Amino acid sequence: MAVVVGFIPTEVGFKALAAAREEAEHRGGPLIVVNVLREGITDDPRHADDQHREIARDHLRGASVRVEFRQETTEDDIADVLLDVVDAERAELLVLGVRRQQDLARHLLGLTVQKLLLSANCEVLVV
């Protein structure tokens, strides 16, 4: 079954990508890599440009499962986009990255992560 990873081009985003690859290979894949763009916001560090996506592809080369990259755009809630992908793919696991361990409580209380943890119809792995 599918593994979906919410990808942002940061150190923690690449750690989440590695964990998602490992989980997808263990579970038999595929791996769906999703980067969500906020409509109307051009300078957001969470947006993966062509170079970031190519680096991510390099990290996933040789994966033993099918890998699919998606870049979705929303003017609404990022969590809703990820939940839609999870549902459409009937994902078994959603992987999310959190910036630093000491920030874990703050992020778990953040609206996006909290919504994903409470609403996903699958397991959620926070890296």
Image: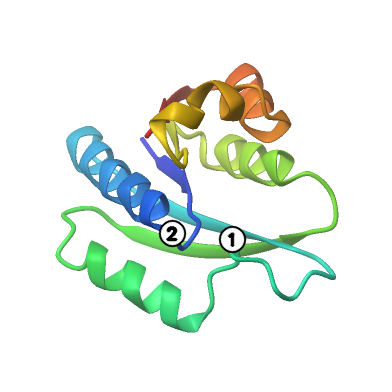
Find the residue positioned furthest to the top: 118
Q: Which residue is drawn at 49% across and 26% down?
A: 104
In this rendering, position of residue 93 left or right of residue 120: left
Whether 50 is drawn above or below 25: the answer is below
User: Would you say 90 lies left or right of 14 here?
Assistant: right
Residue type at mark 1 is Arg
Give the mark nearer the N terminus: 2 vs 1. 2
- The one nearer the camera, 99 or 36, is 99
Q: Position of residue 123 (x, y in %)?
A: 44, 21
Measured from the top left, where is residue 61 in percent x and y?
A: 20, 68
Q: Is 112 or 86 nearer to us in this picture?
A: 112
**Numbered disc 2: secondary structure:** loop
Residue displayed at 54% across by 63% down: 70
Q: In this view, does 16 lie to the left or right of 122?
A: left
Determine which quarter of the picture holds residue 116: top right
Q: Which mark is residue 10?
A: 2
Q: Mark 1 points at which residue?
A: 46
Instruction: Give the residue at the far bottom of this rendering.
Output: 50
**Quadrant for the N terminus in the image:** top left
Residue 80, position in %: x, y?
Answer: 73, 40
